[in-house]
Amino acid sequence: MKDKVVTINSLRINYKIAGKGPAVLILHGWGGSSDSWIEVEEFLVKKNYLVVAPDLPGFGKSSPPPEPWGIQDYSDFVFSFTEKLKMDSFFLLGHSFGGRISIKFSSQHADKLISLILCDAAGIRIEPDIKTKTILAAARVGNVLFSHHLFAVIKERFRNIFYFLLRNRDYVKSNGVMRETIKKALAENLFSELPKIKVKTLIIWGEADQLVPLKCAYVFNKKITGSQLNVMPKIGHSPHLEAPEELSQIIISFLNS
């Protein structure tokens, strides 16, 4: 895979590209980059696909957004990026946060897509379990207790603990514009976008995903008409790192079908 740089709306964007054949655009998850998917990328190149994988704004070697972005901003970026690279028709693969973006993009730009793959995709809210409800209740109490400006530092630490308990390490590890960006992303529920997806769709999920639970996959499968679901046993949130060969075989079978 070769690294290249392109400017999109004044942002310096690093991306990987290699291969010949039908194009596959890969959108990585939060905290990842185009490097995260290198084993899958190289596999697809060997199978005669043109693979394009950008470092999304704020990740890898790409510039951060000038202000906190929402999912629509990232979807618009993907559109501009593909227009710049003259990608008129392509397969779209989105993982986790990249899945959020892929949901929004595919619901708005079906004309550009051959098909869609959502891998452990984030983006929808489901009924919280008892543990989560308890944490949320504690968060509301803490927000009141630490509301005075003298407790600002304690409140921030409390907020970090709250997000950590909800397994949202993305928030805790982020700072500046990207911390505000993840807050905007978490606030968006893309449930209503799912029925708008009309392209052929494969949903891949790690059975043991603790960040985005498997029950989300069943919601996607139900709401996206005609979608296929492939559950990977004993795999967590990152199949591309935990079982790249198995994941690659699942992807290539779908692309070739």
Image (cartoon, rainbow, N blue to C red):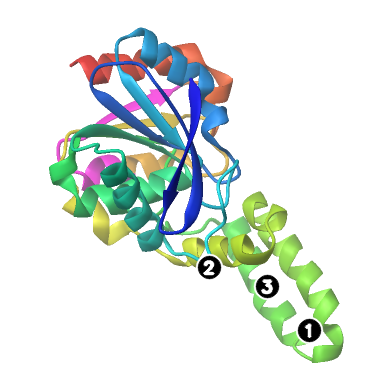
* Residue 90 located left or right of residue 189: left
Q: Are marks 1 and 2 in contact (CB under 8 Å)?
A: no
The residue indicated by pointer 2 is 68
Tell me the magenta residue range.
219-232
Identified by mark 3, the residue type is: Ala
**Disc 1 element:** loop
> Does any portion of residue 198 appear in the rendered image?
no
Residue 231 to residue 60: above or below: above
Identified by mark 2, the residue type is: Pro
Q: Residues within 10 Å of mark 3 (few under 14, many from 20)?
A: some
Q: How far apart are marks 3 and 1 (CA)?
A: 10 Å
Nearer to us in this view, 237 or 245 = 245
Q: How far apart are marks 1 and 2 (CA)?
A: 25 Å
**Disc 3 element:** helix
Using the image, tell me which numbered label, if any, was put on residue 146: 1
Tell me what residue is drawn at x 39 percent, y 62 percent. Answer: 73
Q: Residues within 10 Å of mark 1 (few under 14, many from 20)?
A: some
Identified by mark 1, the residue type is: Phe
Among the 4 quarters of the image, the one containing residue 146: bottom right
Residue 147: x and y, percent? 75, 88
Residue 86: x and y, percent? 24, 38
Residue at the top extreme of this rendering: 46
Nearer to us in this view, 206 or 54 = 54
Tell me what residue is drawn at x 78 percent, y 76 percent. Answer: 155
Q: Does the magenta stretch include residue 231?
A: yes
Closer to the eye: label 1 or 2: 2
Q: How crowded is mark 2: few (under 14 residues within 10 Å), some or many (20 or more)?
A: some
The residue indicated by pointer 3 is 139
